[in-house]
Amino acid sequence: MPNETQEFFEKAKKGFEKMKEQSPETVAAFSGMFGKIMKEGAISLKEKELIALGIGVAMHCEPCIRMHTQKCLAAGATKEQILEAAAVAVVMAGGPAYTHISLVIDTLETLAT
């Protein structure tokens, strides 16, 4: 039986496919910006993904947390680096961000299997 994280990624994939079908201009515009920014540059892709994860935690954005945790791993971040980036978000955003650390941990644990 799939867990919450697996279900999230399956649902997100279907959702993005629908968005691409029904709102192609929005998807193309966002994808273009994302692609130009989220690549190696003055700071590494790994660092950019850790920043994005921290912002996702601070903003309490479950999709952002799950997706950027996955992208952090793909960019070579360690579990320790990911959790530390999430901890920085807690420093900046307090208790509401703290309650979202469990999503980071759940995503890490699911993707590690």
Image: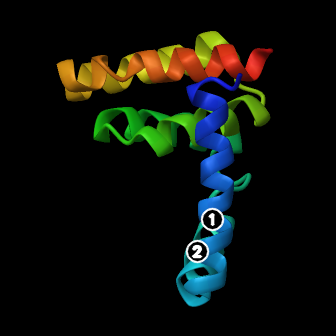
Q: Position of residue 42 (x, y in %)?
A: 64, 51
| Proximity of marks 2 and 1: CB atoms separated by less than 8 Å | yes
Disc 2 and disc 1: Cα gap in Å?
5 Å
Q: Amino acid at mark 2?
A: Met
Q: Residue at x 74, y 52 (%)?
A: 40
Circle count: 2
Q: Position of residue 9 (x, y in %)?
A: 65, 42
Q: Nearer the viewer, residue 103 or 55?
A: 103
Q: Residue furthest bottom?
A: 25
The answer to which quarter of the image holds residue 58 is: top left
Q: Amino acid at mark 1?
A: Phe
Q: Residue at x 62, y 23 (%)?
A: 3
Q: Quadrant of the C terminus?
A: top right
Q: Residue at x 19, y 18 (%)?
A: 95
Q: Residue furthest top?
A: 80
Residue 47 visible? The answer is no
Q: Nearer the viewer, residue 53 or 100?
A: 100
Q: Quadrant of the N terminus?
A: top right
Q: Nearer the viewer, residue 28 or 63?
A: 63
**Vertical position of residue 99 compared to residue 17: above or below:** above
Q: Residue at x 44, y 15 (%)?
A: 102
Relative placement, left or right, of 92 versus 32 is left
Residue 83 visible? The answer is yes
Q: Secondary structure at mark 2?
A: helix
The answer to which quarter of the image holds residue 111 is: top right
The residue that label 2 is drawn on is: 19
The residue that label 1 is drawn on is: 16
Q: Residues within 10 Å of mark 1 (few under 14, many from 20)?
A: few
